[in-house]
Amino acid sequence: MTQKKEVLIIGAGPGGLTAGMLLQHHGYQVKILEKAERVGGRNARIELGDFKFDTGPTFLMMKFILDEMFAAVGRRTEDYLQTVKLDPMYKLYFPEFNLDIRTDLREMKEDIARLFPGEEKGIDKFIEKETKRYERLLPCLQIPYSEPKSMISKHLLGALPILSVGRSLYGVLGDYFTSEKLRLSFTFQSKYLGMSPWDCPGAFTIIPYVEHREGIYHVMGGLSKISDAMAGVIK
């Protein structure tokens, strides 16, 4: 009998758990070592009495990638996790008004028309142009960059013309909206990257675009449940 090859993975964070799922599915004998008391790494949780707190992100973007990962090992996300799509995704508070940020573009346009008359057409332009950027950049995010030659891949070279090199996120949003408050309403995602909208490269306009295109999700019980679910699949 052919003995299964053994793989040792150090760290039971999302990366280690994903690797474990895929390798186990492909017939390897997987062992994962984790120094903490629970799985999750940066996406673990802290428990204080009856309360649980995520130590990492608190909502889920691009859920389709999680679904694809579970499908790759013959499983379904919904069999392990309960997720709720948020709409509105969040509410922004200004001194003069509040603005609900929605995935429903019709409602989003109505709110913009009410609060920023004449600016509502900008959302259509935003979606149209950023769809093209997203479709060119997504393949670049799905290839490994483990070797220098990866930096001259056809996908990356093909995306160069739409990277908005030398422009900021705030500047790119000026192509769609003239109101400062409305532009700021589409920029706070730059804080995910630890940057201000005036310093964040314009190519990252795809982040607010992804939220409007795909929506954001809450995982019941916290995002740490994702790591628990992946560990369950591996077991």
Image (spheres, rainbow, N blue to C red):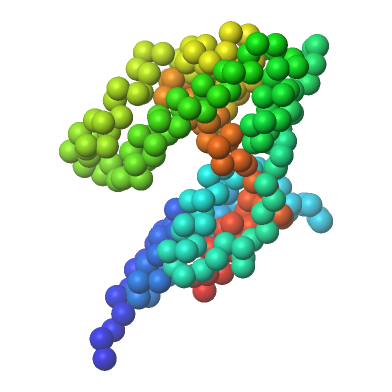
Q: Quadrant of the N terminus?
A: bottom left
Percent of width and height locating residue 30: 40, 71
What residue is at 56 percent from the left and 41 percent from the top? 214
In front of the other: 125 or 87? 125
Percent of width and height locating residue 184: 62, 16
What residue is at 78 percent from the left and 21 percent from the top? 98
What residue is at 67 percent from the left and 24 percent from the top? 109
Asked where in the image residue 36 lies, by quadrant, the reply is bottom right
Q: Is residue 199 visible?
A: no
Q: Is residue 79 visible?
A: yes
Can you say whether 7 is above or below 52 in the image? below
In front of the other: 80 or 98? 98
Can you say whether 174 is above or below 157 in the image? above
Q: How many marks?
A: 0
In front of the other: 108 or 31? 108
Percent of width and height locating residue 188: 60, 23
Q: Residue furthest left?
A: 149
Q: Residue furthest bottom?
A: 1
Can you say whether 146 is above or below 15 in the image? above
Asked where in the image residue 178 lies, by quadrant, the reply is top right
